[in-house]
Image (cartoon, helix red, strand yellow):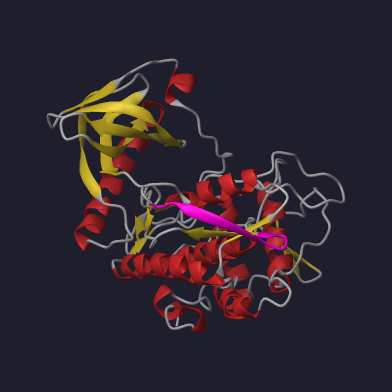
Amino acid sequence: MKRASTCLQHHSLPAKKAYSSCGEKLEFRRFVDFHGTTDKSFRTNWGTDLENVSVLGEGVFGTVFEVADAEKKKKFALKLFKAGHTQFGCEDWVRESEIMKSVAAAHHPNLIKLVKSGKMASVPEGYLRIAILMELRGKSLFSVMDSTKSEVPNKEISFPIATIREIGAQILSAMKKLEKMEIVHLDLKPENICFTSTCTFTTEIRKDVCYISPSEELNVCIIDFGNARKSNQEDLKSSEVVQTQNYRAPEIFMGLPFSTRSDVWSFGCILSELYTGELLFYGNDEHDTEQLQFELMQLILQQAPSYLMMRKAAENKKKMICIDGNVYMKKRAKSSFDPPLPLYKQRRRNDRAAIPLFELLERILIFDPTRRLTFSEISSETFFK
């Protein structure tokens, strides 16, 4: 699934841009290229030297490396926290470690396993001496779709309905567990859903669609609890910006409190993406990217925030305006675009097997979180029966 790099042009649909939970454009770089260092290994305080294999991903506050234990000949994922955010790095490490310990204790097959959380004896320059060591997973949903898109650039990318149901059911099972544990993930997206390292895929082109199917029994796993919170924490702030922008729930845009139903919104966006191969909601390169996406969300879903949401946003001093039934953040986006295709029209013609999926999306992608289904309720929907 390719994220376009061009900016929004007048009277055209905005380029679909991927953003992190902190709003920066996602960018993955190799360790040696970005830091100008050739560190070959990391020394831990628990008596294990880890060989630096490669960089798996990088965010604002940390970097995840693929590392190898030379003695046990086993590979892991090692997350290091950047020193430029010293206070937040330590706080994030403590919070993420505690949540991952709780998740590991649940022993759920679709949740990433914590191996060790502790201090490092040595780290590359620019990092704190604290780390989280996790099991290493295979390709992410995003990387599988993106590589397929590169191979067949002129075809629509999709998973078969049966595969979407299986992937969705496994994500749902994991999220139901987190829901019971009162943990909100807050960064659910294809990049954070990984297959096993042995899983391979085949493709089949039917008409103008390239379908991706696993060549063996699949297992997906939710990773990255860097933004996760306990939903019963008293220090949760409604003004906190969480979730990657493309998968961000309306209440987050409006400065309202987040909950497990904010994760439900992200889940709906992922299900749609597995079917269409494209981001359902997107911003652009302009300064008003959040406003643009907020407007597109209303057009695609043909909904608007409820009166209660507007009132609560006003109480939180989040300025919103209403013009002709549409809600805008402070003011309308300056970027212009053609009307996007409504959600109900994104089902492929004569694809009756997808009807239950789109019926489910209409019940998940609801602006008002109080009316949005919970993960427990979603499991009873027709699509997952």
Q: Quadrant of residue 75?
A: top left
Name above or below for residue 334 compared with residue 250. Answer: above
First to last magenta residue range: 199-209
Residue in front for this viewpoint, 276 or 264: 276
Report the residue at 40% width, 60% height from top.
216
Q: How many marks?
A: 0
Residue in front for this viewpoint, 327 or 142: 142
Residue 203 lies within the magenta run: yes
Residue 64 lies within the magenta run: no
Report the residue at 33% width, 42% height from top.
92
Image quadrant in which the C terminus is located:
bottom left
Q: Quadrant of residue 272?
A: bottom right
Can you give x and y, in whole percent of width and height, for residue 211 in the image? 59, 60
Can you give x and y, in whole percent of width and height, for residue 369 in the image? 52, 72
Can you give x and y, in whole percent of width and height, for residue 199 in the image? 40, 52
Can you give x and y, in whole percent of width and height, for residue 40 in the image? 31, 19
Q: Is residue 239 visible?
A: no
Name above or below for residue 325 compared with residue 140. Answer: below
Q: Main secondary structure of the magenta part?
A: strand
Q: Is residue 338 left or right of residue 154?
A: right
Report the residue at 69% width, 43% height from top.
4
